[in-house]
Image (spheres, coloured by chain):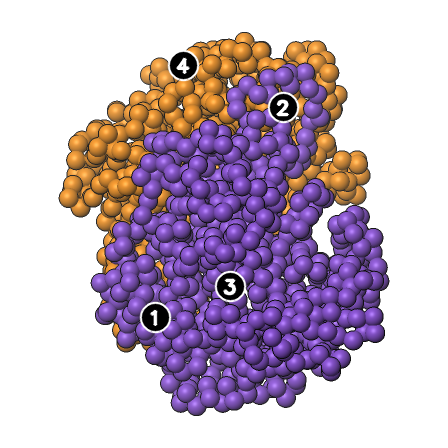
Chain colours: A purple, B orange
Amino acid sequence: MEKVTNGIWKMSFGEPEPHTPVRYRSAPAKEEALLKLDCPGKPPFVEDEVSIRATPRGILIELPLDGDEHIYGFGLQLHAVDHTGRKKVIRVNSDPVADTGDSHAPVPFYVSTKGYGVLVDTNRYAAFYCGTNLRKGESEHKKQEKKAIGTSEIELYGYQVSEGNRTVSVDIPSAQGIEVYFFEGPGLLEAVQRYNLFSGGGALPPMWGLGMWYRAYSAAKKEDVMRLARTFREDGMPVDVFGFEPGWQTKAYSCSFVWDEGRFPDHEAMLQELYGMDYRVNLWEHLFVHPSSPMYESLKPHSGDYEVWEGLVPDLSVEEASAIFARHHKEAFVDKGIAGFKLDECDSSDYVHSNWSFPDIAAFPSGMDGEQMHNQLGTLYQQTILAPYEEAGKRTLSQVRASGAMAAPMPFVLYSDLYNHKVFIRGVVNCGFSGLLWSPEVRQAESPEDLVRRIQTAVFSPMALLNCWRIPNPPWMQVDRDKNVAGEFLPNYEEIRDLCRTLFQVRMSLIPYLYTAYARYSEEGLPPFRALVMDYPEDPRTYGIDDAYMMGDSLLVAPVITGTTERQVYLPEGVWHCFWTRRTYEGGQTYTLAPGLEQIPVFVKDGTLLPLAKPLPFVGDDAMFQVELHAFGTGARECILYEDDGISYAYREGRHNWLKVEVDQENRVHVDRTGDFTGCRYQFSDAGNQQPAQE
Amino acid sequence: MEKVTNGIWKMSFGEPEPHTPVRYRSAPAKEEALLKLDCPGKPPFVEDEVSIRATPRGILIELPLDGDEHIYGFGLQLHAVDHTGRKKVIRVNSDPVADTGDSHAPVPFYVSTKGYGVLVDTNRYAAFYCGTNLRKGESEHKKQEKKAIGTSEIELYGYQVSEGNRTVSVDIPSAQGIEVYFFEGPGLLEAVQRYNLFSGGGALPPMWGLGMWYRAYSAAKKEDVMRLARTFREDGMPVDVFGFEPGWQTKAYSCSFVWDEGRFPDHEAMLQELYGMDYRVNLWEHLFVHPSSPMYESLKPHSGDYEVWEGLVPDLSVEEASAIFARHHKEAFVDKGIAGFKLDECDSSDYVHSNWSFPDIAAFPSGMDGEQMHNQLGTLYQQTILAPYEEAGKRTLSQVRASGAMAAPMPFVLYSDLYNHKVFIRGVVNCGFSGLLWSPEVRQAESPEDLVRRIQTAVFSPMALLNCWRIPNPPWMQVDRDKNVAGEFLPNYEEIRDLCRTLFQVRMSLIPYLYTAYARYSEEGLPPFRALVMDYPEDPRTYGIDDAYMMGDSLLVAPVITGTTERQVYLPEGVWHCFWTRRTYEGGQTYTLAPGLEQIPVFVKDGTLLPLAKPLPFVGDDAMFQVELHAFGTGARECILYEDDGISYAYREGRHNWLKVEVDQENRVHVDRTGDFTGCRYQFSDAGNQQPAQE
């Protein structure tokens, strides 16, 4: 066991492969923050508890798993939260239809309720057997045990190994060697923080990225886009980011990366107009390069040996390729004020009706094969797109459909073409285990109720996104796609629009609280959204919860699915307060709630002084938030807030502040600012304390 | 290219693995029959058109694929028929939820409309890329091509490579060498026949196996079973095979292979009673051996290193293990008159809610790992169970949930826990490409209509099975499971029962025709059920058909799904006659049919003299069929029929007859028997010609 840094250990075996997540890490470990984290100072296993050996298949790793231990992680897993007793294959894929491990962002990293994490540093399709089977003979003592005869699949197949000598076995194909990293606790949460800090710390989005997002109709023309943009402002619908779908390019599937002057004549003037209305513009793309693209010729020698959708697959691990890609994006888009991108189709296609992506047998100039490239491509693509923003000194928050290990510092949020609401909620619960961000985006809906329920989840998620690429008019005007296209609107659409506006405003009021949570993600590796088991690892009743999650330290969110008037919510030990009614609930028990359509169940932890801002219509570069402090429970007199310029990387040089906000007995607000940011983002209702503290 | 035998060629590379389908083949190739098949006499490719090389991943094979070529096969594929442009991974699995190649019986064998077949002899999870991608640069000429902007997933992802320089690339993990077999045409059908004859020829079931099958409630006790058995006979419902589900054993999941005297006191008397009513008894089991089984101790040293459901996984490729398994089955069951088994759970479990099967990393005494064992286990299990029947000189028709390459001689029919009716029909279409038999079994139904539609498909399928393991009473009494369990019956159940009886009787009347088709499967490798493209490879309109199939040479079956009153049917060139109404249809076009609930669309090829028997209630050992000859079209004056004792292997020594049946101008029947079977199975309505012809 080699010590890597404070609280992180490594075991090496054989000849590790040259193309692994850690080798392609975008940022160094945050050593200072790692030193600050409380740390037992010894690896979770002694070396001879872990077996690593070569097999004809590749490499086999075997790690201990106690009978009462539960494990989580493996990246964005949409079909399960607790992976104990399951096999998970780390293979990036779109439309992961079953609980196989396939996902837009699988990660060969897991954490245990015993308080440690394990990262297997590979891009191979590694299979993790998480205590699925016992060894031969271990059940011999069960000769006499009586069992009833099953008459349903679940009775017959529901069996789980839950006792005896279990292991986590990792089957890594093709590899000749491997490096395994171990992350200390003491708790599950600290192990995740360590993993995030080892990855370079969490992403800090620009402040505007936490507002509302709207993506327009794929076939929209300039006039359609502008009509929508004006309507949102006229209707007072808060929207910060306006997204263009494939139609903006001359060629899509594959991409030309060139504006279509047919649909968007004089697009620069259009962009100026949108900027003038304080919109941030986001452009859809994927990385497959159409023959008509200006990048085609120069990228050809640096591309893989197979085409996708008639386009090149650039090897973005090769410096020349990523430089060409980055330069075009800087000159054509970033320098023209484009605020971010939606990076589509960088996952893979084993589960869709045509196998559109490159094969696992593809060969790339770097020496990677298709299998390795599939699992590494998402983060390589994010790094390539991020480069011009770093160069321009502008932050971005963007979207991506594939990611993997070591992605915590990437300001990219995952999404999926799947659309089951339960699955989308599970994504929010799961993404926090592995340094990922996930957006339960709203597309069309089966009913106005479904629309509202989905928007409620989106508003309490890492990115509040409406992706209306299939409908020309806003979903609150018509949820049915065909009618929306035909321009037939709901009779009561104004009522639904008002309901949506209120929810958008709730999001806007949460920005200071949420931005502070993201700042802690960046500095401490603390995920802004996380499963309850991360905050309550001692409470087995939280182990299976896949439909509720923490948003920051203080809010417990339990979304409701359309068609149900009731849902059960388990509240952990302690006292909780309803975010809407302030009603108090005793923790350690499960409640049945029947929230009206206008409410999503949200609970505030007792003792929270919650900062809520007066909702802005958008977050301008110089946005100032009017913050009201809401005390939940007696003795809730203190909270922290983070502030900086919200758009640049100056915060990295210390030009940011941490605010200690206190409310005294006379309800006067005292703010103590520390940090080198000289500006001010927040004004507190008690006008006395809004200026930066004098150092 | 090494010539293996008439019309079959082989390419070898490196050090082939010791555990492959061909090496575990149960029977030698049928050389005589292969010599009889019309044969171009040259391999489909010259050696340098095929590339085989070692990669860090294993072995990579690349084969040519023309722009207009379509490929089929890969075993029991439930989600697609035409695999051109698709990736298929040959990995055995239960509940294959997507079109990935995973299946109960995947086979590394494909056939082409160009008239050849390719078998890659491996048990590895080989991935076949069937012209999925073009090579870099091949689309460069498409610079200027205009494309509309897609606004739906299908527009965006529907893309298929259909031109340019395509290949079939086969990625075989872990292997250090490989043998590839090539099967000549001239047609697609002959290539399949060659593959089946190379496998040892098709299976010939006992005649009773072609009757109706009924599997009883899993938790049924002796009295429940006997009540059902008596009711069928009283109600005149034809049933040949009576199936027992897990409840018959003292332990199930895993299995004891011992009768439970609690639920089935004096089971031998019960069996005698069932035999007395002319039932054949089939017993459910799987191969995982519970600690309480009498086989446990002796099998332990010959088992894999992991348990499944607390039971051993015997390595049936090891002679000692298969001998122990076979001996117990002979003494405890076959010698007691048990007619067959249902071999469950021998596939794998990547897509179900618990991973119950052994891991791919498991190690077996033979040297196979779990991956190889998963793909070989189905056929090993079938061979092990077949052995005692061969020893006893009795034929069986049994069920199995996993199979693979070289399985044509196995008298086992596949089934699935999936239940989509369309998917089940597709299974019938597909199984004929790869030497497999498939049963679109009927379990419960969402409505009486659904029940009847499903039974119609089952009646025109390789095995006519009702699997009522979840309902204590027959489905025609109550389709709803809960009500069925509660004993609440449909008000009009007699009406539905009569409809079902009529369909069962149709099956019974088809037995002589069907038995003859199976005999040709055995002797000529000609699949009794097959896709239209196999009989009409020159007609591209048949290439995509996945909802209709040929049953023997003369019947085209086009099942109807519940909820639809109409369906489209394409009839190939030639004249066709409705099986029910005799109405004539001109081929080469598509018809819209609106059959009533009592009818499933079935068309008889013009010129067919169709032998239909007077339905028997069951097929006794000495069953005699009263055959009526139905002429479809003018000049339909001749047909062939096969006969033998129907139960033993004497037919292998030539004790079987081929009947040439002719109807003369005066409609008198002339029968010309050739063969050494001295008995007689068929009596023809024209009484003059029922005796065996005098040699």
- Labelled disc at residue B102: none
Three-letter amino acid code at the position of disc 1: Ala
> Which residue is located at x 79 percent, y 43 percent?
B491
The relative height of residue B558 versus residue B252 in the rendered view (above or below) is: below
Three-letter amino acid code at the position of disc 4: Glu
- Which of labels 3 and 4 is toward the front? 3
- Same subunit, tags 3 and 1: yes
- Residue B494 at what x, y percent from top left? 74, 39
The quarter of the picture where residue A663 lies is: bottom right
Residue A4 horizontal side relative to residue B493, left or right: left
> Which residue is located at x 57 percent, y 21 percent?
A138
- Residue B364 at what x, y percent from top left? 42, 22
Callout 1: SS: helix
- Which of labels 3 and 1 is toward the front? 3
Query: Which chain hosts label 1?
Result: A
Three-letter amino acid code at the position of disc 3: Ala
In the image, A604 versus A1, the foreground residue is A1
Q: Which residue is mark 3?
A: A203
Callout 3: SS: loop
The quarter of the picture where residue B246 lies is: top right
Q: CA distance from mark 3 to mark 2?
A: 52 Å
Q: Which residue is mark 2?
A: B252
The relative height of residue B391 versus residue B383 in the rendered view (above or below) is: above
- Labelled disc at residue B319: 4
Does the residue at mark 3 contact the one at mark 4 (Cβ under 8 Å)? no
Q: Count of labels shown?
A: 4
- Which of labels 1 and 4 is toward the front? 1
Query: Which chain hosts label 4?
Result: B
Query: Which chain hosts label 2?
Result: B
